[in-house]
Image (tube, coloured by chain):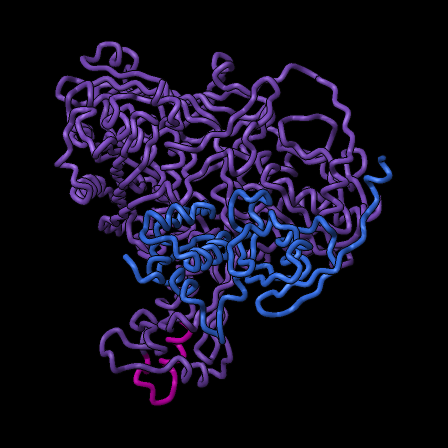
Chain colours: A purple, B blue
Amino acid sequence: MTGVLDVLTHTHRPPVADKDEAWKDEVAPDEGSPFRPLYDDSIKFNGQPIALVVAEDWEIAKFAATLVRVEYQEEHAFATDLEAGRNKATEVKKPHEPRGDAAGALARAAVRHEADYFIPTEHHNPMELYATTVVWNGNGRLTVYDKTQGVQNVHKFLCSVFGKKPDDIRVLSPYVGGAFGSGLRPQYQVVLAMLGALALKRSVRVVLTRQQMYGLGHRPATIERVGLGAKPDGTLDAVTHEATAITSRYEDFSRNDSGWAEQLYKSPNSRYSHKLVRLDVSTPCDMRAPGAASGVCALECAMDELAVALKLDPIELRLKCYSDRDQSEDLPYTSKQLRECYARGAEAFGWSRRNPAARAMRDGNELVGWGMATGVWEALQMPVAVRIVLTANGHAEVSCAASDIGTGTYTIVAQVAADALGLPIENISVKLADSTLPQAPVEGGSWMAASSAHAVLGAAEDIRQDLARLASTMPSSPLAGVDAADVTLVNGTIASNGERNDAVSIADAMRYGKLERIEKQKLNQFAEDKSHARNTHSAVFAEVKVDEQLGVVRVTRVVSAVAAGRILNTKTGRSQIMGGVVWGIGMALHEETVMDHRFGRIMNANIAEYHIPVNADIHDIDVIFVEERDDRINRLGVKGLGEIGIVGVPAAIANAVYHATGKRIRRFPITLDKLLA
Amino acid sequence: MADAANQIPNRIPTNLVVNGVRRTLDLMPWTTLLDALRDHLELIGTKKGCDHGQCGACTVLVDGRRVNSCLTLAVMMDGAEITTVEGLARDGALHPLQQAFIDHDAFQCGYCTPGQICSAVGLLAEGRARDADEIRELMSGNLCRCGAYPHIVAAIQQVMGRP
């Protein structure tokens, strides 16, 4: 057909690596064999790419792709249904060891609650389509513009898959239109675009359709079975949590769904387990607060059910079980202001005015429900390197390979640099997401704020040392002989920490040193400290209004009180939490990837039938940052905010729906058919 | 039959006034207004999020009315005035809605933002939204996966001058 340049398939494509190790990226599951696009003739999942049509323009390629004829042969019966496969689940090893005799204590408990909670498969659906442009530079050199959360991860992956030297490939991703975990691993379009460019020896762009993005990773469907055994006074005697989750046939993906009670609620007996059911789907991947979003949802619904059984206020129950230590390793926390989250959140929400009985509150025709839940996430930190180039005109360029996926990395890197270098923020420029820049891990897990901020501090510290040395040796310097430890960079000067008047301008010091620029690059590594647990926490309060005749649920108010150490930027930080709350509303009421198990095909692979919250679904969201000073976790006391905002929100809403209607929906999302049933 | 289906039709000359500038393009009959803007005029501010009119990321103004440019064939817009996000600022000053979006941090990743802002310009011109609830309802064709909705509503309210 005119305009078609090539059709690549497993029988017609440039060579790629044949060992699994070459296809394992930085965040690939340990167990399994990563998917290789166009590698061989086996079909592993619905939505798998089997051919790449490359044409002179996009419309021709799109039309030509519809003309490709495919012959299939059924190799073995396939399965995509988690619940049908539950009895074939295999247990994976997780760090949470059992304590005491959980099964016995649960059986003997005076008040017991045990139930299954079902979380469906969900897809990230960032607004930006996955796309890669490979620019053919000649001599085997390629510049790759990719949608990814980790340019260096993609760089290393492409070098190993295509047998390229590090200098042959440069990966850039300066702006990312959302990702939420879907861009942690290199996605298949980057492999397809590389194959196209290498086959044709010219630049190639591959843009996925929204439908094709349902063949990428997903939050795995899980059955979360939670058991709680309590004494009549509301203290816990047993906690059991067994998560059974989907994975693919070719990789074992699992996260910590079931261990969170270990950090939240005191119990002498506990057992946590994680099981996998291998199905004919693509490998799941991290999706905002992976593990916790699902597992804590179930745990917090179960706590609400227990509170009802005990006739206790849900907050009172949580305070009775409150754990000041992480029980899995019996460690204290670097900081844990969760009590304050409950108090501040409850006050802002007006919780004391709650009538504890279900179906007791009304607003006109609508039933009103108030529910609450706890949120918890890890405060992780990773090695990151940053380069700062300070020029004599008082400008600094800060660069790092880290990504900004909309979370605000550009902003906080500039802020921390301005602060540490004593320069106005307008004088700082930030370069990110280029694989040739200093080392950074993928942007995920809420670790980038603390990790990048401390890397900036490290490089700025070296610059300060150089400037102090210059200032101390300058002729007639007011800082003659001063020690580097005794000066701070402030207002464009090197200033003595004692007398504020003793200062030398940075420009003068550099002129004296005949320096046009000072360049420092430093890798920051956090000291290993296994003596304390590190977590962020939240208390989430939700109000729902339910039209009982129609089954329509509206989330009219949410208060999220968050303790996450020092907040580097309250404006962007608040937006992170607000976004997480919106995700939680979606998880509670809207989101579900529906599979037709007869065909193994996703039935709603588009953004109209896969429902995410729209503007009309979102009402008042109040974000409270609870003061939490943490001198131990890191120098700035920063913990990260990307995930904590979603955790607990679905449970708070489900609990509010119960409070409004008296109906306990344990199968998410809580859609109107379930309420009308 | 197969031959006829594979025949590439002729390009059609199309006149568009884009952000006040008259542009003439020779376009395939199936080229959408979105692809014409992005791929032919290199106005990449307008975004493609679904290509099915489901997400609103491609919203532009056609003769002052907000439309999904992915569902609009460019050749059918012959002679129309198109305003994209690139055409909103005047003499180097941001459009009040652009400034309001910055003031309220009404975006995170920014991908839906050009569509949100164009849609909000259209909304204000329609004059139908009187309060926050009506803004929410009438902005619900523009999805934001980052969840910036409350701040988007606040930004629009700021420009409307109403609480």
Determine the residue positioned at 33% across, 20% down.
A226
Q: Taking A334 as reference, is B107 left or right? A: right
Q: If the image is split into quadrants, where does the N terminus of chain A sit?
A: top right
Q: Position of residue A386 (x, y in %)?
A: 48, 60
Residue placed most toward the observer, B102 or A18: B102
Residue B110 on the magenta segment:
no
Determine the residue positioned at 48% across, 37% down.
A286
The image quarter in which residue A140 lies: bottom right
Question: Which portion, as a residue range, is magenta?
Answer: A465-481
Residue A471 on the magenta segment:
yes
Residue placed most toward the observer, A93 or A202: A202
Q: Position of residue A464 (x, y in %)?
A: 39, 71
The image quarter in which residue A8 lies: top right
Q: Taking A95 as reference, is A139 left or right? A: right
Which residue appears farthest toward the bottom when viewing the image? A476
Q: Is residue A120 above or below residue B123?
A: above
Q: If the image is split into quadrants, where does the C terminus of chain A sit?
A: top left
Residue placed most toward the observer, A388 or A358: A358
Q: Is residue A264 above or below residue A414?
A: above
Determine the residue positioned at 45% across, 85% down.
A511
- Residue A484, visible in the rendered structure: yes
Q: Taking A658 as reference, is A455 left or right? A: right
Q: Position of residue A630 (x, y in %)?
A: 26, 50
Q: Position of residue B13 (x, y in %)?
A: 74, 60
